[in-house]
Amino acid sequence: MTHNPTTSSTGTNSTFGIADKPHWLARFDLASWGIEDVAYVRSINQNGESLYGIFAADGTELATVESRDTAIITVRQNELEPLSAH
C-alpha cells in the first residue's frame, strides 16, 4: 500500500494532515503518546555536578542518577522504554 503525502495550505508536505494541526495540539499529542511506556533520559546539571535525569513523557522528573548507563538500566528495570532527550 502506498501513501502519497499531500501539500498543505502552508506549502509543506503533510502525511495524514499532521502539519495542519495547531502547534500546541502537536505538543499535547506528543506528551500523551506513550506516557505509560517510555521515560526520557537527559543530562542535567545539579549543584555544579553533571548527572542524568529520568523524566516521564509529560516532563515529570522521576529520578536523578550519576551515569547515563545507570539511567537506562533503571528505566528498563521499571519496564519502560528509554529515550534520549537533548
Image (cartoon, grey):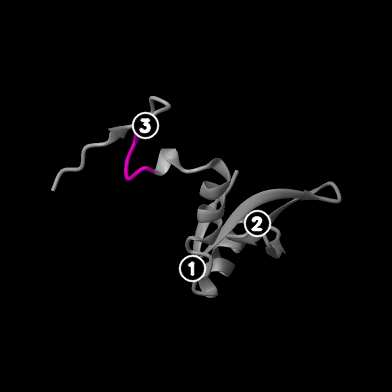
Does residue 22 appear left or right of residue 15 in this picture?
A: right
How far separated are the C-alphas under marks 3 and 2?
44 Å
> What amino acid type should be assigned to the residue bearing mark 1?
Asp
Q: Which residue is mark 2?
A: 67
Q: Earlier in the sequence, mark 2 or mark 1?
A: 1
Q: CA distance from mark 1 to mark 3?
A: 32 Å
Q: Horizontally, is 10 left or right of 60 in the view? A: left
Q: CA distance from mark 2 to mark 1?
A: 22 Å
For the residue labelled by badge 1, is the local secondary structure a helix, a strand or a loop?
loop
Q: Residue at x 53, y 61 (%)?
A: 32
Which sits earlier in the primary sequence, circle 1 or circle 3?
3
Packing grade of label 1 (10 A; few <14, some 14-19, many >=20) is few
Q: Is 71 situated left or right of 44 in this image? A: left
Image position, residue 6 (x, y; %): 28, 34
Principal secondary structure, stretch drawn in magenta: loop
Which residue does the numbered mark 1 point to in the structure image? 37
Between circles 3 and 2, the one closer to the viewer is: 3
Seen from the viewer's position, the closer of residues 16 and 44 is 16
Residue 31 at x, y percent in the picture: 56, 57
Q: Nearer the viewer, residue 57 or 8?
A: 8
Under mark 3, the amino acid is: Ser
Q: Secondary structure at mark 3?
A: loop
Q: Quadrant of residue 18?
A: top left
Query: Mark 3 — residue?
Result: 8
Task: Give the residue drawn at x 49%, y 74%.
Answer: 79
Magenta highlight range: 13-17
Location of residue 19 by image quarter: top left
